[in-house]
């Protein structure tokens, strides 16, 4: 039955994005189905937003349909299958074949429109970085939860025969994450993925401990994911250079050899050291920031995170989180950023209370709040606070307050971190870790959520609406007139008539 439901959702979406011939690429992240489209004008935005399974849409470098966690991972394969079926069933006939020049002109027009709208070089760079790390999130979550369970079992001294196995399961992916980053980086930048993975594998190879660079011995894993990213980008450019200059008859032998050799030497005698120093700098800076300006840093980070989510740029922080997890075992930034979702939840509850007669908005809030408590903010952002305007700002105020709360405790030495990235809200509890014991860590994080809920609620309740907004959004429905003793009874028509349709 679940498969039928997911296929029905995919079948409802496909015609509204212009059909299979209009879809050029299909991927998904934690909550969104991301589509490449040949012609953006063929998309029916309003009809998509009206679908029960769709929580919102976002136009970025790809067209993003917000379906929520879990759902998107099940709908995407069904959508891919439907696209393939439609393309196979309706082959393009000769009269519909377009020339290469027409395709190039159409593509150039689409690219120009997108660039003119929002494609700055910086944004494009951040999106490419996000595309490298987003596919890794499910493994990070799974391994992080297993690590948390293993830590709990060790503290309770339960199942000692099982904990070494759990430790291996939880740590195996993190030990080789550089290889996966290198693979995805080469794929994203147009190289051969396996060559990117091969070069990145040098970073985690135990034998690098026998090599000296910059006057010191290298250590396996030095440079981490940032070194792997840089190595794979370098390998991609070397590979492209080889493709241009190496004769085709020698390409299969020379190109991969030169790619791995040259980028490998640069990685060993340059990138590993430099990326290692940069990674150490990230950890040092994050700790200094929270140790010395914890409350203020939390205020800023928690308050600005919702706009990043709105723009889809929050995923660009994944490399920083991953670097901190590699170094310290947890990222101290994610629990603070998660407070933005708490402010959003408090804001939505206040909107629900203030707009007592707006059935449409209240229904949206009721359906989106469970996901909001679990840290999925897009439904509440795009369905409630952002369209209303001022409540989006007051939601950010709630996030800032929660962030300041968690940041303050970090400043006095009680660090709260997450062993993995991806979830937030209540879903982050299984991934929490810190330096003062699990009980205190959970208490601080839970207190931050409560502060975010309360401040988001009260800021929205008292400052989220102007008088005009309340009048327009919360008009009292007209009360039916009550009959008086002197008023005549309504006449009954003895002849049956067809009932008039009710107005919706």
Image (cartoon, grey):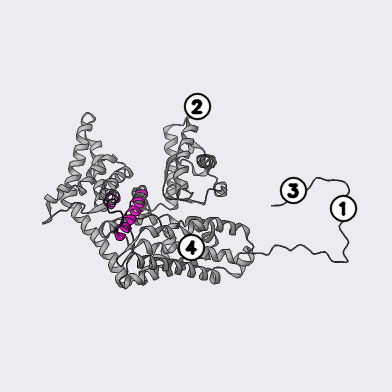
Farthest top residue in view: 94
Task: Please give the name of the residue rendered at 23% of the width and 42% of the height, measured from the top-left corner.
Answer: 198
Answer whether labels 1 and 2 touch (C-beta < 8 Å): no
Q: CA distance from mark 2 to mark 3?
A: 46 Å
Highlighted range, magenta = 138-167
Question: Label 3's element?
Answer: loop
- Count neighbours of disc 3 (C-alpha within 10 A) and say few if under 14, some if 14 to 19, many if 20 or more: few
Question: Label 4's element?
Answer: helix
Task: Please give the name of the residue rendered at 31% of the width and 54% of the height, measured from the top-left corner.
Answer: 147
Disc ID at residue 492: 1
Answer whether labels 2 and 4 touch (C-beta < 8 Å): no
Mark 3 vs mark 1: give the one in front. Answer: 1
Q: Which residue is mark 4?
A: 344
Question: Taken as a whole, is the magenta stretch helix, strand or loop?
Answer: helix
Where on the picture, by quarter, is residue 425?
A: bottom left
Of the residues under marks 1 and 4, which one precedes in the sequence? 4
- Count neighbours of disc 1 (C-alpha within 10 A) and say few if under 14, some if 14 to 19, many if 20 or more: few
Q: CA distance from mark 3 to mark 4?
A: 39 Å
Answer whether labels 3 and 4 touch (C-beta < 8 Å): no
Q: CA distance from mark 1 to mark 4?
A: 53 Å
The verdict on residue 151 being magenta is yes
Question: Label 2's element?
Answer: loop
Q: Which residue is mark 2?
A: 93
Evaluate whether residue 113 shows in this view.
no
Q: Which residue is mark 3?
A: 501
Location of residue 247 in the rendering, given as x and y in whole percent from the top left corner: 22, 31
């Amino acid at each position: 039955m679940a498969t039928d439901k997911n296929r029905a959702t995919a079948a409802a979406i496909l015609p509204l994005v212009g059909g299979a011939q209009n879809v050029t690429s299909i991927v998904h992240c934690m909550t969104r189905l991301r589509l490449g489209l040949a012609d953006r004008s063929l998309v029916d935005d309003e009809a998509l937003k009206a679908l029960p399974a769709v929580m919102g849409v976002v136009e970025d470098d790809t067209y993003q349909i917000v379906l929520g966690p879990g759902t998107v991972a099940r709908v995407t394969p069904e959508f891919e299958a439907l696209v393939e079926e439609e393309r196979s069933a309706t082959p393009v006939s000769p009269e519909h074949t377009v020339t290469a020049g027409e395709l190039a002109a159409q593509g150039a027009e689409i690219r120009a429109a997108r660039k003119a709208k929002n494609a700055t070089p910086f944004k494009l760079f951040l999106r490419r970085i996000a595309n490298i790390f987003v596919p890794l999130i499910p493994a990070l979550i799974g391994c992080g939860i297993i690590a948390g369970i293993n830590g709990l079992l060790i503290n309770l001294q339960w199942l000692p025969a099982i904990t070494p196995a759990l430790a291996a399961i939880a740590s195996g992916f993190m030990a080789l994450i550089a290889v996966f980053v290198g693979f995805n980086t080469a794929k994203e930048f147009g190289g051969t993925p396996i060559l990117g993975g091969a070069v990145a594998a040098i970073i985690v190879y135990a034998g690098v401990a026998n090599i000296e660079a910059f006057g010191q011995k290298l250590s396996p894993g030095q440079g981490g994911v940032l070194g792997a990213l840089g190595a794979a980008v370098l390998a991609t450019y070397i590979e492209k250079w080889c493709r241009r200059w190496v004769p085709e008859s020698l390409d299969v032998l020379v190109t991969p050899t030169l790619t791995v050799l040259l980028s490998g030497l640069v990685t060993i005698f340059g990138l590993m050291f430099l990326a290692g120093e940069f990674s150490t700098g990230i950890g040092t800076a994050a700790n200094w920031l929270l140790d010395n300006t914890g409350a203020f840093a939390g205020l800023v980070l928690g308050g600005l995170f919702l706009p990043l989510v709105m723009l889809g740029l929050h995923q660009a922080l994944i490399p920083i989180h991953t670097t901190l997890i590699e170094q310290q075992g947890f990222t101290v930034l994610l629990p603070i950023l998660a407070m933005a979702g708490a402010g959003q939840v408090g804001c939505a509850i206040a909107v629900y209370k203030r707009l007592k007669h707006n059935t449409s908005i209240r229904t949206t809030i009721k359906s989106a709040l469970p996901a909001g408590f679990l840290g999925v903010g897009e439904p509440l952002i795009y369905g409630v606070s952002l369209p209303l305007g001022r409540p989006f700002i007051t939601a950010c105020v709630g996030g800032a307050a929660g962030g300041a709360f968690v940041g303050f405790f970090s400043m006095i030495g009680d660090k709260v971190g997450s062993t993995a990235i991806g979830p937030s809200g209540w879903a982050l509890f299984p991934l929490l870790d810190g330096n003062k014991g699990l009980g205190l860590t959970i208490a601080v994080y839970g207190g931050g959520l409560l502060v975010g809920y309360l401040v988001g609620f009260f800021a929205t309740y008292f400052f989220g609406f102007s008088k005009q907004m309340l009048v327009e959004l919360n008009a009292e429905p007209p009360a039916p007139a009550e009959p008086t003793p002197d008023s005549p009874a309504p006449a009954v028509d003895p002849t049956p008539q067809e009932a008039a349709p009710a107005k919706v």
